[in-house]
Image (tube, grey):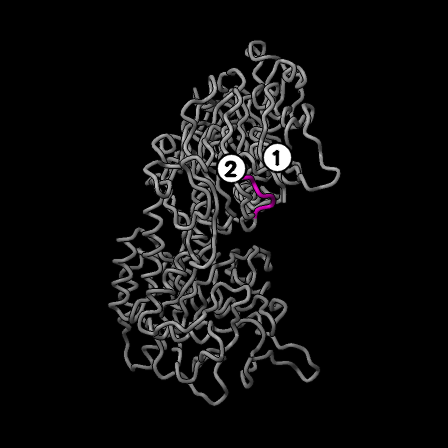
Amino acid sequence: MGRALRAATVASAAALVALAVAPPSARAAVPPRVDLRVLVVDDGGPATAAITSELDGAGTPYTTVDLTAAGRPVITAGFLSDTVSGRPRAKFQAVVLPSDNPFGAGSTEMAALAAYETAFGIRQVDAYTYAQPSVGLNYAQTGGYLGPLDGVQGQVTAQGAAGDFGYLKGAVPFEDNDPYQSESYGYLATPLATQAAGASFTPLVDAPIPGSTERGVLVGQYTHDGRSELVIPFVYNQYQQQFRLLARGIVEWMTQGIHLGADRNYFEVQVDDVFLADDRWNPTLNCTPGDVDCPIGTGDDTDPVRMTAADAAYAAQWSKAHGLTFDFVFNGGGSEDWKSDHDTTTDPLANQLIADKNTYRWVNHTYLHSFLGCVQDVSVVPWRCQTTASGAVQWVSTSDITSAVQDNRTWAATHGLSLNDQELVTGEHSGLKLLPQQPADNPNLASALTVLGVKYLASDNSREPDQRQAGPAVTVPRFPMNVFYNAGTAQEETDEYNWIYTSQAQGGSGACTTSGNSTCLTAPLDPATGYASYIVPLESRIDLGHVLGNNPRPHFLHQSNLAEDRIAYPVLERVLGDYAALFAANTPTVNLRTSDIATELQRRAAWSTAWKGGDVTAYRIGDTVTVSAPSGVQVDATVPSGTRQAQLLGSTAFGTAYAGRLSGWTQPGLLQFAVSLTLPSGAVPAAPAKAAANSPAALAAPVGRLPVPKGVAVAVPAGPGDSKRP
């Protein structure tokens, strides 16, 4: 990234001729074809990588030009556009640059891009550039600010809220997770008081300038010379909350609200072991009696954690009050065992949960939570797979797996619980491979799933983050929440947390080292306050990051966390509260059940394979979008409200409303070979009027060299006089 010096000739008539397209007056009779693909010019820095990750996650096709690669394509008029069947074609609907001009002064590539953007009304994102007059801003050294932005409170402006950032409620807080390290860096500057003739600058997101009553730009639209740039004068990476909040708006702005792919915020919580009692953490033994992590001879837990009827009633009230439907992943045999242990014919917990059964979704977790992989030898710690005399692994049989699942179905039917029998969560995700003891799936798992008709099988995202096939089923990776299954109180949770995440010298297991692990502790947490002060904020931030990442994978915790101190609720309330403070009502969290999550992941995988393999053709001509994909591959798109899908006869509604747009999956109608979407009138904004070239901006006093912010590929200068390159 470097200081951009703009050539006044880049939008000249000569450049338009070089593009081999007709001038605007001639093009009026023949609307150009604009391919739905983004051009990303990448310098290897985190800002362009962040935008690329957003496009990838949403399924928005793009082409990358790697500026660091030898033999890379040269950006010319022919690279950007051509003519198809006599119609001018723009090969890219938007351009992402690492800065306002990464090619240097007098670059023919930048001239070609500028002429292309002017000719076709294509928008450009400056992923990270410094505040300077050539992007419509004053230098930050002139009444502005340059430096760390940790903890800055950004705000969507009225213009941003009325446009592509209207899905946000207003606040755009910058993370400040580590008081000892700078996490973000950038420039806060005001727009030029007097812009060049015909140019304008519209702040879309801003923040207070320290030591000033003015507000500096964080994101703004600079319109000039018949072009529009989205100016972003701060550096970021794909994981930071401030980028995740703005990512949707960046894409909507540059594509003018018409693009392939979609971005939604998902939050689904599954509660395992419902009706069971979970073994309790022992702070003296630093293990869980009754589980396989305790030394042989420790004995069973005599005081397990199990929800009460009051806990169940609270869960129903909480779920309704917070608008979050739990998936209760249940083991019916746990209720029968409780009745047997207590010599009674009724289970108050089961009675309450069944009375509220329609408040939840129910998922089969097998009858008694049996381990369904290899036959475990628990005479040693850690456990190992039992083997035959010849050394062959002994596996849980097909019939035992089938019985464990079918018995739970029978229990559910007896008690009036509605199930989707295609969904299954095995105990500890067993049956699937489990390293290091069991490096392969139980070979009997596939046949059992076939007999049972299971198509969607839960897996542990921390072990297997990718969806895969397991016999006839596909896996649904779930995020394990760091609220432990064996803790019913905040103090138990904190004690176990300290054991796992502190050094031996501090009384911990020593399994965690601070090197490369952000969850390792430098000192033990206070047992009385550590859960609320440290674990809840950290876990909720991690979970909210998943929500903001367009990731439909569910989170899971355990019934023990809804019992006693009910320690799950503070985390969930923090996630929901933080989310509600950030997003407008038109952008709610999406809560899917297991089978729908599996289908979403399958569709995304097929769509990604298709567009990355060059098997998708998509373009807009006027107010019509046409998309063709391989047979059986559903098309994902985001378009303005009012868009309809053309059918052989008439049209039908397209997608569902989300974040001020319509989005969703679709496929060609009857006897059609492509998806055809008709945009509402006025959905495609006219290109900005061409103005006279900018007059040279006055240069401010030279400034000293600034340090390179961590993660930035090339340092941008602070202002005039700082022209060195690292």
Q: What's the magenta region? A: 712-717
Count the marks. Answer: 2
Q: Amino acid at mark 2?
A: Tyr
User: Which quadrant is the C terminus positioned in?
Assistant: top right
At a point 47% along the width and 57% down the height, the residue shown is: 181
Mark 1, residue position: 102
Q: Position of residue 676 (x, y in %)?
A: 53, 27
Q: Amino acid at mark 1?
A: Pro
Residue furthest out toward the bottom = 297
Which badge, 2 or 1, comes first in the chain's sequence? 1
The relative height of residue 650 versus residue 379 in the rendered view (above or below) is above
Residue 383 appears in which quarter of the rendering? bottom right
At a point 60% along the width and 23% down the height, the residue shown is: 7
The residue nearer to you, when weighing 345 against 567, is 567
Mark 2, residue position: 130
Q: Using the image, tell me which numbered label, if any, was put on residue 642.
A: none
Left or right of residue 602: residue 164: left
Q: Position of residue 600 (x, y in %)?
A: 50, 47
At a point 60% along the width and 56% down the height, the residue shown is: 469
Q: CA distance from mark 2 to mark 1?
A: 12 Å
The residue nearer to you, when weighing 702 against 716, is 702
Query: Between tags 2 and 1, which lies in front?
Result: 2
